[in-house]
Amino acid sequence: MPGLLGKKIGMTSVFGADGKNIPCTVIEAGPCVVTQLKTVEKDGYAAVQVGFMPKSEKHTNKAEAGHFKAAGVQPMRHLAEFDGFEQEVKLGDTLTVEMFEENSYVDVTGTSKGKGFQGVVKRHGFGGVGQSTHGQDDRLRAPGSIGACATPSRVFKGTRMAGHMGVDKVTVQNLVVLKVIPEYNLIMIKGSVPGAKNSIVVINK
């Protein structure tokens, strides 16, 4: 699917035609520069690599510098690959937010907020076990039994327990594009998208 890289600005709300207040996320999408064209003959698959947010040559290693020099573009901070572009693109072309249309649908991929080490109630939605009497007053949020002792004498893989939560790759599908503001490279998408403010997201058309 064709798409763009963007930066999550934050959330706001707009009024719809029916007067309802609609929550939405504001994303600075692009402009993105085409940095590489992958072909089936050379790479085994067809895709378009785009870059987002320029960076100085001082913070670019030699491998990256050679890659961007071959494309004839300025070094970019973030790269992503897309396929299925409707129009033919060339190295150095600039892709803008104008490729999206209002009332169309997009998929947004981002990295969820990190929550650190969390228990089963927050991480998996456990209701808590035990009771508040009989010496269990401090065990209300404990996970309870995690396996039988006789058979199979082990804990099954995938058992839901406490652990690291967040910082996962999350995709939210079929979000409605409420408004596109090309002069500021902004796109307003209905609802929330994964990630914190100023985090990088991928918008697939």
Image (tube, helix red, strand yellow):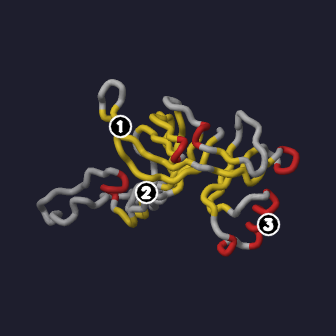
Residue 2 drawn at (x, y percent): 65, 40
Quadrant of res 106: top right
Query: What is the CA distance from the residue labelled 2 to the residue labelled 1?
Result: 19 Å
Q: Is residue 152 something one can see in this rendering? A: no
Q: Residue at x 39, y 59 (%)?
A: 161
Q: Earlier in the sequence, mark 2 or mark 1?
A: 1
Marks 3, 1: nearer the viewer: 1
Q: Quadrant of the N terminus?
A: top right
Q: Counting other residues with Cα less than 10 Å from the Cα at mark 1, is it few (<14), some (14-19), or many (20 or more)?
A: some
- The residue singled out by tag 3 in the image is 66
Taking 122 as reference, is 157 left or right? right
Q: Residue furthest right?
A: 41
Marks 2, 1: nearer the viewer: 1
Q: Residue at x 53, y 30 (%)?
A: 104
Taking 3 as reference, is 48 left or right? right
Residue 129 drawn at (x, y percent): 24, 55
Residue 121 drawn at (x, y percent): 30, 55
Labelled pair 3, 1 in contact (Cβ < 8 Å): no
- The residue singled out by tag 2 in the image is 197
Q: Residue furthest front?
A: 183
Instruction: Please tell me whether residue 125 is drawn above or below residue 116 in the rendered image.
Output: above
- The residue singled out by tag 1 in the image is 14
Query: What is the CA distance from the residue labelled 3 to the residue labelled 1?
Result: 45 Å
Q: Which mark is residue 158?
A: none
Residue 143 drawn at (x, y percent): 31, 58
The type of residue carrying mark 3 is Gly
The type of residue carrying mark 2 is Lys
Q: Which SS class for mark 2?
A: loop
Taking 194 as reference, is 17 left or right? left
Callout count: 3
